[in-house]
């Protein structure tokens, strides 16, 4: 047991596990003790703020930022590091560096085909090509989640219900908010704070700022 290990995430097959071990970012096979990838902790005044593993388990994205960017610390303002590193798990090396965007980070995740990285703040998400860093598309939304098969993308903006998009075209397939379940009986509007698909893709779960969880059947 290690009290400094945090932020777990599995790949699609649950054969590879991403985790923070103190300042390091690691990936290991779930059936072995040996780590497949160990990204050393960054040099001061920088930190790794967040990491995610691709659905295939072959790539890892790590947010690499200076404390001057994150906290505005006077002793770190000279360092403007603000990037997202892309690492190959099998090769054990960094293969790309993507711009982060400069706004307050809410999360990152790979698309179902590993080709794009979704970077989200509190008002929009931006999809960037993993290799070139080029902006592929963007959308005003607060939360997002790909279905396990990668065919659907659930999104939710502030004070609105969730929508399910065709992941390839990003056109709305259907909404899951016709009865406005996020509104209380007093008319108060609660933002959706989390979206998650069930393992079989048949259920979409949303949690809001009012402390409620709604489960939607996709059939």
Image (cartoon, rainbow, N blue to C red):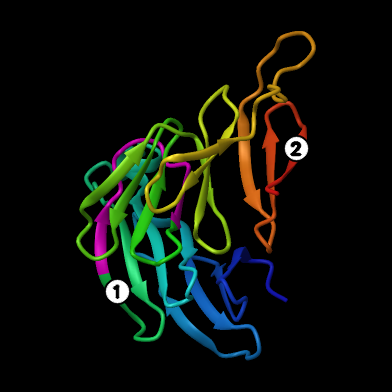
Q: Residues within 10 Å of mark 1 (few under 14, many from 20)?
A: some
91 w.r.t. 154: above or below: below
Residue position for label 1:
94
Q: Position of residue 182 (x, y in %)?
A: 69, 24
Earlier in the chain: of badge 1 and badge 2, it is 1
Asked if disc 1 and disc 2 are in contact, CB closer than 8 Å, the reply is no
Span highlighted in magenta in the image: 96-109
User: At 77% across and 8% down in the image, what residue appears?
Assistant: 186
Q: Is residue 99 magenta?
A: yes
Tag shown at residue 214: 2
Circle 2: element type: strand
Q: Is residue 163 left or right of residue 141?
A: right
Q: Quadrant of residue 40?
A: bottom left
Work out how far the residue at label 1 is from the one at label 2, CA to CA, in angstroms.
39 Å
Does 157 appear in magenta? no
Q: Secondary structure at mark 1?
A: strand
Q: Position of residue 71 (x, y in %)?
A: 40, 38
**Closer to the camera, 176 or 80?**
176
Residue at x 49%, y 69% (from the top left corner)? 55
Q: Residue furthest top?
A: 186
């Amino acid at each position: 047991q290690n009290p400094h290990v945090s932020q777990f995430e599995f790949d699609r097959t649950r054969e590879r596990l991403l985790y923070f071990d103190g300042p390091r970012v690691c990936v290991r096979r779930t059936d072995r003790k040996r780590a497949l990838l160990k990204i050393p902790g960054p040099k001061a005044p920088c930190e790794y703020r967040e990491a995610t593993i691709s659905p295939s388990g072959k790539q890892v994205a790590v947010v690499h930022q200076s404390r001057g960017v994150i906290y505005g610390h006077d002793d770190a303002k000279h360092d403007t590091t603000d990037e997202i590193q892309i690492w190959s798990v099998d090769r054990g090396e960094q293969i790309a560096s993507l711009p982060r965007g400069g706004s307050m980070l809410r999360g990152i995740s790979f698309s179902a085909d590993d080709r794009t990285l979704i970077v989200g703040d509190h008002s929009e998400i931006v999809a960037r090509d993993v290799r070139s860093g080029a902006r592929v598309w963007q959308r005003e939304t607060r939360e997002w989640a790909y279905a396990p098969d990668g065919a659907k993308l659930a999104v939710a903006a502030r004070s609105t219900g969730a929508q399910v998009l065709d992941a390839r075209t990003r056109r709305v397939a259907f909404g899951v908010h016709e009865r406005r379940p996020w509104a209380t009986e007093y008319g108060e509007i609660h933002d959706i704070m989390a979206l998650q698909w069930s393992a079989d893709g048949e259920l979409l779960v949303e949690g809001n700022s009012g402390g409620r969880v709604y489960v939607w059947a996709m059939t």
